[in-house]
Amino acid sequence: MSEYLDLIMFVALVGAILLGFPVSFSIAGVAVAFAYLGWVMGAMDITLMGATGQRIFGLISNQVLIAIPLFVLMGAVLEKSRIAEELLDTMGRLFGQLRGGLGISVVLVGALLAASTGIVGATVVAMGMIALPTMLRSGYDPRVASGIVCTAGTLGQIIPPSTLLIILADVMSNAYQQAQYEQGKFSVEALSVGQFFAAAIIPGLMLVVLYLVYILVRGFLRPQDMPPATLDTPRPDRLEIISAILPPVLLIFAVLGAILGGVATPTEAAAVGAIGALLMAGIRVGMHPRLILFGTAALVCLAILAGLFPVRLQRSDLEFMSLAAGGLYIVLTIVGAVAIIAALYATLRTRSLHGAVDSTLTMTAMIFATILAAGMFSLVFIGLGGEERVAHILTNMPGGPMGALLFCMAFVFVLGFFLDFVEISVIVLPLIAPTLIVMGHDPIWLGVLLAVNLQTSFLTPPFGFSLFYLRGAAPPEIATGQIYAGVIPFIGLQIIGISLVWMLPQLATWLPGVIF
């Protein structure tokens, strides 16, 4: 029995999670129990657990993962300040008179919110509370409406910036380095978050197109499922459209442009995004727009000028132009700081920042606790011989490298029915990714395939998180069975998306190859 402890350990983990225990405690508890069980049965050297402290220190000092709470804060501020609601209302009135127009507006808003917030729960709940009742009043089939809202909300996991891509970039970079060591390369290359952000942009937009094509075709074939909306409010004018869409788009360009352009690291760009969201929220909650706009313009000018003409004021041999530029930078910094403080005061006064900080703390604690516990789990799993078993299974899989990849994709897809993307990313992927990379698969392409697969886990019954989020926000007349039935066509579209990335690797590898 001792030779199968690694397999029993994995089954015990799934069972503990399905019983409803908190995920991080389940992972850590199973790891500790099987570590002592393996020690008693002579299957594991218990001193291996001494590496736990090093893993914890490595996690809390990981510069890449610091971007997670900042990106979560950016999305939470945008959600709590009701910017997402304004965007949904404007887009709904813009496309509502078309057949399937409300569905189109939900998908487009989902894509915009994905690129500016990256938080699935916030997006699904917002659209479930705002767009879903409007779709039902307009005569939409409840299953179709529920499926569109659930699926549009999951775009936050594949369109950068997203917490999934940040975690995946860290996992795949470690796996790539491990694979290079196994191949005898000791001058190893690393992968960056920016490369995965760039790689996910085209597949993410491809999924948006697939959703839109499906809505248009279904609206044409079954017009009774998605009739035009009979909205009482008039169509928005050009100024309303620009004021609703332009701020999130500018924030997206500022964050992704800084990362992909090599101007800032993902952590620095996440800080820019959090400040940008705070300034946008300041306007939304009643702060004087001119003050915020002046402050934003000052910060943008400061970033551009300081990048083009850096000045080191501590030097003693500065010329007059350098001193003048330094003085200008100080003035711009003060103007920007005044705007930030004003926005901070306004959001604190209206208590919109309180909820954003609370949800940021909760989500960040959940993610990092899971990663910490997963580090313990993987240590024990490796100590019980699980890593060698996984490598043996994959290398002996019929069909060679493609057969092994197909098995892993199917395995991750099935796990998505029961486990969250964080657990799969930090427990399963570190075990299979190094072997797949050694077998010749491109790590960037492999990462995007897995990202789309993990995005699907939000939609797969019975434990898809997007389904739970919508169940909590949907009107009482929407049955749980209707939500489950509504997402099935979109799960099929996800499989089509995975197949397209599989058959056309350039969808994932072209953009990072051009930029990096």
Image: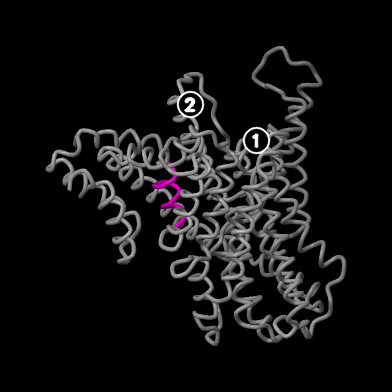
Rendering coords of residue 281 (x, y %): 66, 59
Type of amino acid at the residue the image marks with label 2: Gln
Q: Which residue is mark 1?
A: 264
Relative side of 167 to 92, left or right: left
Relative side of 376 to 455, left or right: left
Who's the residue at 49% across and 34% down the image? 439
Magenta stretch: residue 114 in it? no
Rendering coords of residue 25 (x, y %): 30, 55
Relative side of 371 to 377, left or right: right
Start-end of magenta stretch: 420-430
Rendering coords of residue 207 (x, y %): 67, 58
Who's the residue at 77% across and 38% down the image? 301
Where on the picture, by quarter, is residue 317? top right
Q: In what element is the residue under mark 2? A: helix
Who's the residue at 79% across and 78% down the image? 99
Residue at far left of view: 40
Instruction: Report the quarter where the C terminus lies.
Output: top right
Q: Please tell me whether residue 116 is drawn above or below residue 396 in the rendered image.
A: below
Residue at far right of view: 238
Q: Please tell me whether residue 433 is drawn above or below residue 293 in the rendered image.
A: above
Q: Which mark is residue 180?
A: 2
Out of 484 and 111, give the one closest to the viewer: 484
What distance separates the C-alpha of mark 2 from that of mark 1? 27 Å
Out of 409 and 156, give the one closest to the viewer: 409
Where on the picture, by quarter, is residue 386? top left
Magenta stretch: residue 422 in it? yes
